[in-house]
Amino acid sequence: MIVFNRPTSAPGALQKLESAMASGKLSGDGPSTQKASEMLSELHDGAKVLLTTSCTHALEMSALLLDLSPGDEVIVPSFTFVSTANAFVQAGATPVFVDIRSDTLNIDEAQVAAAVTERTRAIVPVHYAGVGCEMESLGATAQRHGLTVIEDNAHGLFARRNGRPLGTFGAMSTLSFHETKNISTGEGGALVINDEAFVERAEIIREKGTNRSRFFRGQVDKYTWVDIGSSYLPSELVAAMLVAQLEQAALTQQRRSALWWRYQQTLGDWAQEQRVVLPLQGAPEDGAYHMFQILLPNLAARTAFISHLREREVMSVFHYVPLHSSPMGAKVGRAPFGCPITDDISDRLARLPLFTDMTETEQQQVIDAIASFRVHG
Ligand SMILES: Cc1ncc(COP(=O)(O)O)c(C=O)c1O
C-alpha cells in the first residue's frame, strides 16, 4: 500500500536525542529549544519564535494575547482545521466564518472586508497548502479597523508570497510540526511573533502565567504568578528532534518539490481530459510543497477516485469538512454570507500521497493508478 503520509525522518535525530537525554535537562527551554527557535527566527526575518507543543497551542496562545471578551468576533475561513476557530472560541470569541477563493482555496479577502463589524478583533488567514493569502488586502482591512492579523501557517513553512516568507505578514503566525508536516516532531509547533508588543506577555502565558523567562534572564530576582497562562512549551527532546529536522530542511524541500512538480507535469493531460483541477502554484522557489491536492468535478467522482486508488493500493484522502455548518460551528459561530465555495471544494478535493522519502517507484504507482481513472457522467 502506498500510504498517504510517512513522517519525514532526520538521520541526525537519534544522536541529538541521545545528547539531550545525557545532558540531564529534559524540560523545556534548554539549549535545543534555543537552537531550534533561532533557526526558525532566521526563516522569519528575525522574528521572536516560541516553540509550543502544537500549532493548536500556538493558536491558543495568540487568542489569549488578544484579551478577548464575550461577543468579540474573529474572522476565520470555514475551510480549515478545527483549531483555527476553536482556539478563539475557547478564549471567549465568536468565530465569523467566511468563504474561500476558488483559485487558491484561501480566505476571500473581499468577504473578510465585508464581514468586519464593531466587534471584530482579529483576522486569521490560513495559507492553504502553503500558497499565500492576499496579505496586502487583508493587512489594509486590518489597519483600517484596528484588527490583529494572525496567520495560521501550519502548511506554509519555507513558502513565500512575492519573495516574502509566509508567517511574517501578521502580528503573529503559527507553525505545526505534526507528523504530516514537512518538518515533523510527531507533535509540535511554534508561535512566531512579528509585533514586539506581544513578546513579553507571550512568554508569560507560555510559562503557566509566571514571569519565569524574565527570571532566567536575570531581569527579576524571583519568579511569580503574574497573568493567566498554561504549559505550552515542548520538552528538550522534541526541540532536539526539531533541530535535526531543520538541519536537513533544504534536502527535505528539494525532495518534496521534485515530487510535487512530477505530479504537476505528469498529470496535466489526464487532468484536462477528466476536468480535474490541479493545484495552483506561484514561483517554484516560493512553494511550501506540503501537499498536492486535486479537485474532481463532483462528490461522486471524488468518491469513485478514492476507491479506484484504494483498489490499486494507493491511499488518497479528502480534507477539511466545512466548519460553519459543523455542529459546534453552527452553535457558536455565524457565517454572514454562507460558504458555498467551501461546501463545494470540501466535496471535490482529494490529496495525493506526498512525503519526503517517497521513491520514484512509489510515486509512479500513484501516477499509474490515477492515469487509469475516468470520470463518468
Ligand atoms: C490549518 C491548520 N491549522 C492548525 C492545525 C493544527 O496543527 P497541530 O496538529 O500542530 O495542532 C492544522 C493541522 O493540520 C492545520 O491544518
Image: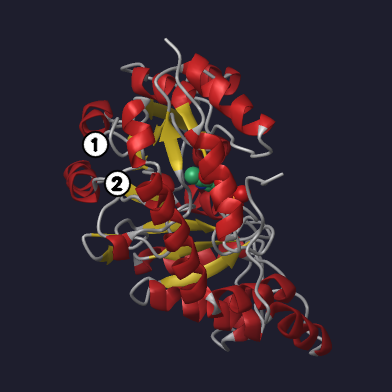
Going 65% across and 66% down the picture, which residue do you hit?
233
Going 70% across and 78% down the picture, which residue do you hit?
13
Q: Tell me, yes or no, if residue 233 can be seen here.
A: yes
Give the structural element (helix, strand or loop) at label 2.
Answer: loop
- Spot occupied by residue 290 in the image (x, y as percentages of width and height): 48, 54
Give the structural element (helix, strand or loop) at label 1.
Answer: helix
Count of numbered marks:
2
Q: Is residue 369 above or below residue 236?
A: above
> What residue type is disc 1 on?
Glu
- Spot occupied by residue 167 in the image (x, y as percentages of width and height): 37, 60
> What residue type is disc 2 on?
Cys
User: Outermost residue toward the top?
Assistant: 377
Going 66% across and 55% down the picture, which residue do you hit?
6
Q: Is residue 298 above or below residue 364?
A: above
Q: Is residue 374 above or below residue 262?
A: above
Q: Tell me, yes or no, if residue 70 can be seen here.
A: no
What residue does disc 2 label? 133
What residue does disc 1 label? 109
- Spot occupied by residue 279 in the image (x, y as percentages of width and height): 36, 42
Q: Dot 1, crowdedness within 10 Å: few (<14), some or many (≥20)?
A: many
- Spot occupied by residue 344 in the image (x, y as percentages of width and height): 40, 19
Relative side of 180 to 18, left or right: left
Residue 141 location, quadrant:
top left
- 2 or 1: tag closer to the N-terminus: 1
Q: Are marks 2 and 1 in contact (CB under 8 Å)?
A: yes
Relative side of 188 to 94, left or right: right
Going 29% across and 58% down the picture, which residue do you hit?
169
Ligand 1 closer than 8 Å to label 2 CB: no
